[in-house]
């Protein structure tokens, strides 16, 4: 029996919820919020939710104390038939919690900068495979706890699951700095400086990663993580039909011909967000960069024009899909912001129309996206990005009707997400997936499916839920629908609460903060220590049950490497920063 709370606390002006995890027979009927020292400041009635899927983690009630706006250190006391249950203490502050979390996440990126012997190697990289030449690609951020490679994307062989990695991280720092400025909070002064410092570090890396074609190289790969660094870093490539991530050799290695396009990005595999990052960088003066603002913008323009005309050559299936389109929409929006050239705005409008055509309308005002014909869009890392791209486009679109259309479409997408997430017992507000399984049957569940085009890859999805928190925050700032606005605010905060410990395992996903941080082990070794301020992959369905739940903390059974749960990955922190910045408090 326990009252689960956000381990760090809550913003005074925001939604504040806790969850009681107990037994059906506990029958709690009353709770109060007490200030440190004993004063009761709020009283409320728990709302019964029941059990969740096949988690087998308890019976649930939610406790909402959003109406309390006071600051300080508090705890929750819950009266049950089995006695009084008291939560761990937590803070309520105006903006301070958000500032601390953004600050920690930003320092995580500083710690992930390529340096030392890795930096030395990256100044002169050869190519993995047959391609000739060398590239100075120093800079960038290590991708994950167990992967000191640097990637703009991966999973290209899966066609519809590309995550946005280092290039989107670079973009996020500029966008977050702008959101902090828009908040009007003067206490963000130093945070904004660090945001611009990190964003420009990422932009300079993207400039070095440009390929002679006009696009970008996709990846700096590394050999076995415990191998020598010297000579083991290369400009990497991806096969189009398989991956070597879980084996020594990709399944299609003997049948595929690797050419220059395998080393470079499509718009979906990091190219679109790289363009957005460079365009955004061109709008911000920051001293000490290796390139000028004009050079950033010209590189972004050149990359857009080349990749737009040649994108099919760089995709694994020779076609565009939704991921290419929403990454392109973000790129075009930033190109227009930076250049004020009307043609980019026209192209952005056309790209938004392409996205609208992929929407499947449902009864009422709800809709979901298809990533390609007949296949619902779902994503382990960036599910909020289509909504965010539409909102960003709406902000620059000068035609009021077109701008309103983009907001309307974003509203419909988020209403669908809220509907599928609240149509079952869901005390934590965790977002569910609509997807087609391997038999073509549409299903809805809580966690990323085990059997997909990128199998055996599956992992915790803290990036995904943070991306949906960011999307909800972006939309609630512009929607006129007050009922939707209220639902979005709760939903946005619930995702951050989950990451910060309000989950069935009472485990804070940010290393060095809260309680019960998970540690990453590999073959019973702990070489890959997680970094303070970083966020691990997180909670998944059970290994043998899609309706179950798991967070594997210790070696044992079939798990010799708990990367799926414990490994840190930069998209988690990237989206977390953006979700917090969109609060504007």
Image: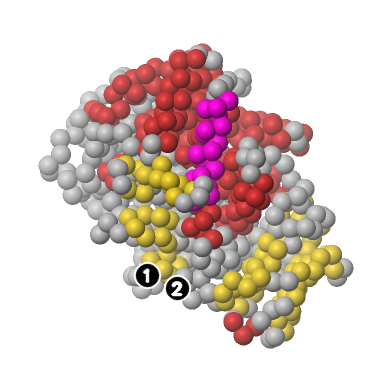
Residue 382 percent coordinates (x, y): 45, 44
Report if the CB atoms under discs 2 and 1 are less than 8 Å apart. Answer: yes
Which element is circle 2 on?
Answer: loop
Q: Which residue position holds label 2?
A: 54
Q: Image height check: is 384 above or below 550? A: above
Q: Image height check: is 42 above or below 394? A: below
> In percent of the image, x 65 and y 60: which residue is there?
6
Q: Is residue 199 left or right of residue 477?
A: left
Q: Which residues lie in the magenta part?
A: 400-416
Q: Is residue 92 left or right of residue 175?
A: right
Q: Which residue position holds label 1?
A: 545
Report the predominant secondary structure element of the magenta stretch.
Answer: helix
Which element is circle 1 on?
Answer: strand
Image-quadrant location for residue 20: bottom right
Task: State the residue in front, 229 or 371.
Answer: 371
Q: Image height check: is 265 above or below 293? A: below
Q: Earlier in the sequence, mark 2 or mark 1?
A: 2
Task: State the residue in front, 47 or 225.
Answer: 47
The disc at residue 425 is: none
Q: Is residue 414 magenta?
A: yes
- Within-10-Å neighbours for mark 2: few <14, some 14–19, many 20+: few
> In percent of the image, x 76 and y 55: which residue is there?
92
């Amino acid at each position: 029996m326990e009252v689960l709370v956000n381990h760090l606390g809550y913003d005074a002006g925001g939604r504040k919820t806790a969850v009681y995890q107990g037994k059906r027979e506990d029958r709690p009927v009353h709770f109060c919020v007490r200030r440190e020292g004993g004063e009761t400041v709020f009283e409320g009635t728990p709302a019964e939710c029941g059990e969740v899927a096949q988690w087998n983690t308890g019976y649930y009630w939610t406790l909402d104390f959003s109406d309390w706006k006071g600051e300080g250190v508090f705890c929750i006391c819950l009266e049950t038939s089995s006695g009084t249950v008291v939560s761990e203490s937590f803070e309520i502050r105006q903006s301070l919690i958000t500032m601390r979390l953004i600050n920690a996440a930003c320092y995580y990126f500083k710690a992930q900068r390529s340096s030392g012997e890795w930096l030395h190697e990256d100044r002169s990289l050869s190519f993995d495979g047959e391609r000739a030449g060398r590239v100075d690609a120093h800079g960038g951020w290590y991708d994950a706890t167990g992967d000191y490679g640097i990637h703009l994307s991966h999973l290209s062989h899966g066609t519809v699951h590309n995550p946005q990695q280092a290039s989107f991280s670079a973009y996020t720092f500029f966008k977050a700095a702008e959101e902090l400025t828009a908040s009007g909070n003067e206490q963000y002064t130093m945070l904004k400086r660090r945001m611009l410092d990190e964003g420009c570090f990422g932009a300079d890396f993207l400039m070095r990663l440009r390929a002679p074609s006009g696009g970008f190289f996709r990846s700096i790969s590394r050999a076995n993580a415990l191998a020598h660094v010297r000579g083991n870093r290369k400009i990497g490539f991806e096969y189009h039909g398989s991956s070597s991530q879980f084996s020594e050799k990709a399944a299609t290695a003997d049948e595929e011909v690797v050419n220059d396009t395998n080393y470079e990005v499509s718009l979906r595999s990091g190219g679109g967000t790289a363009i957005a990052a460079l365009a955004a960088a061109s709008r911000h003066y920051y001293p000490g960069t290796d390139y000028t603002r004009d050079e950033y913008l010209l590189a972004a323009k050149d990359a857009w024009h080349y990749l737009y005309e040649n994108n099919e050559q760089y995709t694994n299936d020779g076609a565009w899909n939704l991921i290419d389109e929403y990454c392109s929409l973000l790129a075009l929006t930033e190109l227009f912001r930076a250049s004020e050239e009307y043609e980019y705005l026209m192209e952005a409008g056309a790209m938004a129309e392409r996205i609208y055509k992929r929407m499947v309308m449902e009864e009422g005002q709800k809709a979901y996206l298809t990533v390609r014909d007949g296949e619902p869009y779902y994503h382990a890392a960036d599910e909020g990005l289509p909504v965010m791209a539409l909102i960003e486009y709406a902000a620059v679109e000068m035609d009021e009707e077109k701008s309103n259309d983009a907001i309307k479409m974003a509203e419909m997408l988020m209403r669908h997400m809220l509907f599928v997430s609240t149509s079952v017992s869901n005390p934590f507000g965790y977002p569910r997936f609509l997807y087609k399984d391997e038999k073509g049957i549409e299903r809805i569940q809580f966690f990323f499916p085990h059997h997909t085009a990128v199998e055996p890859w599956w992992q915790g999805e803290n990036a995904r839920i943070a991306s949906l928190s960011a999307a909800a925050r972006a939309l609630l700032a512009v929607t006129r629908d007050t009922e939707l606005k209220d639902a979005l605010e709760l939903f946005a905060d619930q995702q951050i609460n989950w990451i910060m410990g309000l989950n069935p395992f009472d485990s804070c996903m940010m290393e060095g903060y809260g309680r019960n941080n998970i540690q990453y082990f590999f073959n019973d070794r702990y070489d890959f220590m997680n970094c303070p301020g970083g966020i691990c992959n997180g909670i998944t369905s059970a290994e043998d049950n899609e309706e179950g739940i798991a967070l594997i903390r210790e070696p044992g059974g079939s798990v010799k490497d708990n990367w799926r749960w414990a490994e840190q990955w930069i998209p988690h922190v990237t989206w977390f920063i953006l979700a917090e910045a969109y609060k504007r408090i």
